């Protein structure tokens, strides 16, 4: 058997305090561990050899490459708070310490990753493993080692094949890991069998993502939804005496159930189940209540006829950076997965004065746990009801097509695939011209920007403005000074194109929504005549600016009928 964990590495990693002190040693350690695993996989799988030093996480950017972007933001609001969430070494999570109901409060620390890939899909497995390592690290763990096994399908009983399970047990023992993380969603029975074999906690990708979400959710609704998702995940995975005894009764296992199957007893499990069910019911009720409040809020936005643009995309693509760049919103930006977990809505204005909202959303990830798709409809709901989806893609990522596919799948899952989509390749400061050509081939209508340098942002704004629905009706009005309310309605919801203060009132040329025509009918001076040729758009005069002196010639004469 290969030496999975040589001493030099062990030294570097055993001092987890050091690794926690700054990000770089952690990241280096993660990268080393993942590369070791991949090298082994290549050696055993006889895949064509390749360079792993190029390997990068599916989502996490290369630290050096994004450093410039990170430094420039200056908007890392709760970064310190976030850093405080990183776990402390020494809180060991031996399987026996963890009662089943507390299973959801994982304390990941020293983890070993495992994955299975089919022949020919090593590239994909590599990306996925890097991403899993990044996820584990975001959750606060240090990645020590791992096993990648090539086989057509995971073993239905133990995920890895029997020989590999033994190897895994040795690796876990040798490096003192306390958790094994599988790069997939494990069936409850697989997880159980693996735990019995390796004697430490085994969790899957879904559990890691849920854990990250639970650490980072901030709003009351976000927290409630994550808890609900966790309980949903937990429920079929409760285990205890009851089960292992019935297994014994069936003659399957005798005495070898292992410490992982020692549970708090059948009654306790039943009690837990009931408690979980009632907690879930309570959470569902609470969420329904909060949803009503959110709907009202959104309805008032919809009622205002303000178009909404949602910024969606793979996690770490730079959505929040882009929102900050577009609106100076001050949203947390981190080279971390799922930095954003609650929707941030910002109101902004097109160059012609039309207001619209920009919504930052939670990042998408491959194999998004289905419990979370359900649970995160709240942030994704903003996507569902938006007029335009700005789909941000990390241009410097090794597999942008894969990311785009994943995001579109989730968009389809939430029933938003009929909303217009604008692909934006971000982080263009990191790519060369060849790459631009390649990406253009992938998505011909895309805009290329850099949230870090501001490159391409004006063009992006222009494209957004051209794609959001514009108030379609032109009206020419003579508003008496007593109707300041109508004028402000035009400013807020429509688009005021020209305006002149005259003796008897304000003369206005504006674009409004068809269902607002009734509100201004009394003041129309265009006599509902066929609309003239559309005049060129002009920037809306600021309200404090001096009134426009003269009316343009295109304006019809005031008709005193
Ligand atoms: N070099 C470079 N880095 C960027 C750019 N835009 C964002 N980044 C970096 O990419 C990382 C992720 O940015 P975020 O804005 O947090 O990404 P996000 O898509 O909101 O991520 P989640 O909220 O985690 O889904 C940060 O380290 C940013 O500084 C860019 O244009 N160029
Ligand atoms: Mg974000």
Image (tube, rainbow, N blue to C red):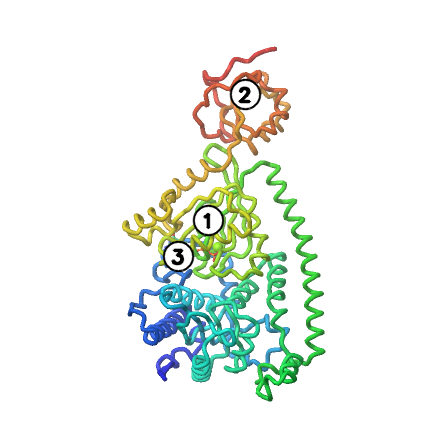
Q: Residue furthest bottom?
A: 255
Q: Is residue 441 left or right of residue 175?
A: left
Q: Are marks 1 and 2 in contact (CB under 8 Å)?
A: no
Question: Which of the labelled discs sits on residue 324, or is there none?
Answer: 1
Residue at (63%, 69%) from the top-left corner? 235
Q: Which comes sooner in the sequence, label 1 or label 2?
A: 1
Question: Which of the labelled discs sits on residue 297, or is there none?
Answer: none
Q: x, y percentage for residue 300?
A: 63, 40
Question: Which of the labelled discs sits on residue 476, or is there none?
Answer: 2
Q: In the figure, residue 149 lies in which quadrant?
A: bottom left
Q: Secondary structure at mark 1?
A: helix
Eye-nearest disc, 3 or 1:
1
Residue in the foreground of this view, choosing between 10 and 253: 253
Separation of residues labelled 1 and 2 (CA atoms): 37 Å
Q: Which comes sooner in the sequence, label 3 or label 2?
A: 3
**Quick check: is the Cβ at mark 2 less than 8 Å away from ligand 1?**
no
Quadrant in which the C terminus is drawn: top right
Residue at (44%, 44%) from the top-left corner? 422
Separation of residues labelled 3 and 1 (CA atoms): 14 Å
Eye-nearest disc, 3 or 2:
2
Question: Which of the labelled discs sits on residue 71, or is there none?
Answer: 3
Q: In the rendered image, is residue 402 in sight?
A: yes
Classify mark 3: residues with Cα within 10 Å, few (<14), some (14-19) or many (20+).
few
**Quick check: is the Cβ at mark 1 less than 8 Å away from ligand 1?**
yes
Separation of residues labelled 3 and 2 (CA atoms): 49 Å
């Amino acid at each position: 058997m290969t030496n999975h964990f040589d001493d030099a590495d062990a030294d570097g990693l055993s001092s987890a305090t050091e690794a926690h002190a700054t990000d770089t040693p952690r990241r280096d350690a993660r990268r080393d561990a993942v590369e070791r695993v991949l090298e082994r996989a290549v050696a055993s799988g006889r895949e064509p050899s390749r360079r792993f030093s190029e390997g990068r996480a599916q989502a996490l950017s290369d630290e050096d490459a994004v450093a410039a972007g990170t430094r420039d933001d200056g908007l890392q609001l709760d970064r310190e708070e976030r850093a405080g969430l990183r776990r402390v070494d020494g809180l060991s999570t031996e399987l026996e310490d963890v009662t089943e109901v507390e299973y959801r409060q994982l304390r990941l620390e020293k983890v070993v990753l495992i994955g299975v890939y089919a022949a020919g899909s090593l590239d994909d497995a590599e990306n996925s493993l890097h991403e899993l390592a990044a996820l584990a690290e975001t959750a606060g763990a240090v990645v020590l080692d791992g096993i990648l096994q090539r086989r057509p399908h995971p073993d239905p009983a133990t995920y890895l094949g029997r020989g590999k399970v033994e190897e895994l047990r040795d690796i876990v023992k040798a490096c003192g890991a306390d958790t094994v993380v599988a790069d997939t969603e494990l069936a409850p029975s697989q997880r159980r069998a693996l735990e019995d074999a390796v004697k430490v906690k085994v969790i899957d990708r879904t559990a890691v993502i849920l854990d990250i979400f639970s650490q980072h959710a901030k709003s009351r609704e976000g927290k409630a939804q994550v808890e609900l998702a966790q309980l949903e995940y937990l429920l079929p995975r409760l285990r205890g005496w009851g089960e292992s005894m019935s297994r014994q009764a069936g003659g399957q296992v005798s005495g070898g159930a292992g410490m992982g199957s020692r549970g708090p007893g059948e009654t306790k499990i039943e009690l837990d189940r009931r408690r979980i069910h009632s907690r879930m019911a309570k959470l569902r009720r609470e969420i329904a209540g909060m949803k009503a409040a959110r709907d009202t809020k959104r309805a008032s936005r919809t009622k205002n006829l303000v178009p909404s643009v949602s910024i969606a995309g793979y996690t770490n693509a730079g959505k929040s950076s882009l929102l900050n760049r577009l609106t100076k919103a001050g949203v947390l930006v981190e080279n971390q997965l799922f930095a954003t977990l609650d929707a941030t809505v910002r109101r902004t204005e097109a160059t012609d004065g039309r207001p619209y909202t920009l919504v930052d959303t939670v990042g998408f990830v491959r194999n998004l746990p289905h419990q979370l798709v359900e649970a995160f409809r709240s942030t994704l709901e903003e996507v569902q009801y938006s007029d335009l989806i700005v789909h941000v893609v990390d241009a410097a990522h090794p597999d942008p097509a894969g990311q785009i596919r994943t995001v579109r799948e989730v968009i389809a899952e939430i029933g938003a695939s009929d909303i217009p989509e604008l692909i934006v390749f971000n982080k263009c400061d990191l790519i060369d011209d060849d790459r631009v050509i390649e990406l253009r081939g992938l998505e011909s209508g895309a805009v290329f920007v850099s949230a870090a340098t501001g490159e391409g942002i004006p063009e992006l704004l222009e494209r957004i403005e051209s794609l959001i629905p514009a108030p379609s009706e032109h009206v020419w009005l003579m508003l008496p000074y007593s109707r300041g309310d109508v004028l402000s309605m035009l400013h807020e919801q429509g688009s005021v194109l020209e305006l002149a203060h005259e003796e008897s009132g304000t003369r206005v040329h504006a674009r409004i929504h068809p269902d607002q025509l009734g509100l201004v009918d009394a003041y129309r001076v265009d006599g509902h005549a066929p609309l003239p040729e559309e005049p060129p758009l002009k920037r809306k005069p600021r309200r404090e600016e001096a009134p426009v002196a003269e009316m343009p010639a295109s304006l019809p004469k005031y008709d005193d009928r």
